[in-house]
Image: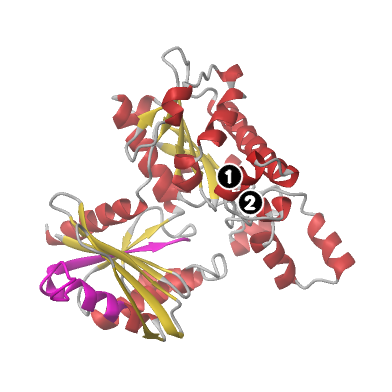
Amino acid sequence: MKILVINAGSSSLKYQLYDMTDESVLAKGLVERIGMDSSIVTHKPTGRPDVTEVSEILEHTTAIRKVLALLTDKENGVIESVDEIQAVGHRVVHGGEFFKESALVDAEAKSKIRQLFDLAPLHNPASMLGIKATEANMPGVPQVVVFDTAFHQTMPETAYLYAIPRVLYNKYKVRRYGMHGTSHDFVSKAAAEYLGRQLEDLKIITCHIGNGASLTAVDGGKSVDTSMGMTPLEGLMMGTRSGDLDPAIVPYVMNKEELTVNEVNSMLNKHSGLLAISGISSDMREITEGMEKGDAHSKLAFDMYEYRLRKYIGSYAAALNGVNVIVFTAGVGENSVVLRKKVCENLTYLGVELDEELNAVRSGEPRRISSKNSKVEVLVVPTNEELVIARDTNRIVQSLNA
């Protein structure tokens, strides 16, 4: 079975085409600047040169049509006909309490995704555009939705409820949902497999550290707590997001600066985090370079970022009553040698002992970076959210044909 995986944003669309016989990627790419006359399409057929085109793509239906044309192109394509694509899997950020697992796209699923627009106003509407565009271009082809929040639906009430009037949960479902669930699920399973141990026997803290960042406490393969909340804003300090802060700051600053709700929302989501503290960048690579050059603001940004990350690891060790494995993943987690080193140096009370030589190795494979004497296994595991989507899509569609 060949499966097309789509991650639709409001003005972008990422895609990967999988051959599920061996889970190989036949091609992947990105459509940027949808809605403009200078949209950029980057198509990457495996084993062949990349193709970049600039054209007018005003909406997602045209974007999908362009992707399908490239996938079947005589020179740059990887399949002869669109008919070879037997299913499409979509990443959807918010599944609320409706979706505890991935689901086949039907009228009911689409209705529920629309009901969740308020909880993920930047993401769920974009996902719906991707679903509709696929329907228009590939009528009759089964589609599956895979949710960032689904993995965290195993959290107990003690972890997901906020200490605010219960009526807000009853009426509006105000609670912690968490994000990056496909990544946390994938790397926790991959960690157990790498170690040759049963997932059910492990207490794992997974650290998905990218421009957006979250931690999850995984007990026996189930999420029992996670750092992002009702939205991706809660939790760790991130590239441009503030993470945790005193909620009283919001009305205080709004009053002092005469800000609107939209303005303060933009400030906390797009103009805070590493960018705000460093004054340079939201990119950890540039922060690290600035720190190495002696820039005090970059060092402060790095130190705050590391401190909050380490503090959450400590709190989740308490939540789990111990920890067997700590996993670093995503862009920063997989690539920042210096951040991993600093975090692990300050976790010695847990029995963490870093092997600096192993930590310095760069690899696209799962690997151990803790020493033989470390009481906690520390791993770097590259995440693969697209593969999770492809696998779930394959499983659900195969069950329809059983």
Outermost residue, front side: 293
Taking depth in this image into account, of 329 and 3 the one nearest to the observer is 329
Task: Tell me which residue sits at (35%, 37%) in the image.
Answer: 363
Residue 272 is situated, as x and y percent measured from the top left of the image, at: 69, 57
In-front residue for pair 5/156: 5
Q: Which residue was labeled with disc 1? A: 227
- As helix, strand or loop, the secondary structure at mark 2 comes to loop
The residue located at (57%, 70%) in the rendering is: 118
Which amino acid, mark 1? Ser
| Towards the viewer: 101 or 284 | 284
Residue at the spot x=74%, y=49% of the render?
245
Dot 2 amino acid type: Glu
- Residue stretch rendered in magenta on the structure: 64-93
Give the quadrant of the C terminus: bottom left
Q: Which residue is mark 2?
A: 234
Residue 149 image position (x, y, % from top left): 46, 54
Q: Is residue 32 above or below residue 302?
A: below
Residue 287 lies, with reference to residue 352, above or below; the image says below
Q: Relative to 312, does residue 143 appear above or below in the rendering? A: below
- Separation of residues labelled 2 and 1 (CA atoms): 7 Å
Which image quarter: residue 189?
Answer: top left
Q: Nearer the viewer, residue 82 or 200?
A: 82
**Cβ atoms under marks 2 and 1 closer than 8 Å:** yes
Task: Decide if residue 368 is in sight here.
Answer: yes
How would you rate the neighbour count of disc 1 (Cα within 10 Å): few for under 14, some for 14-19, many for 20 or more? many
Q: Is residue 72 magenta?
A: yes
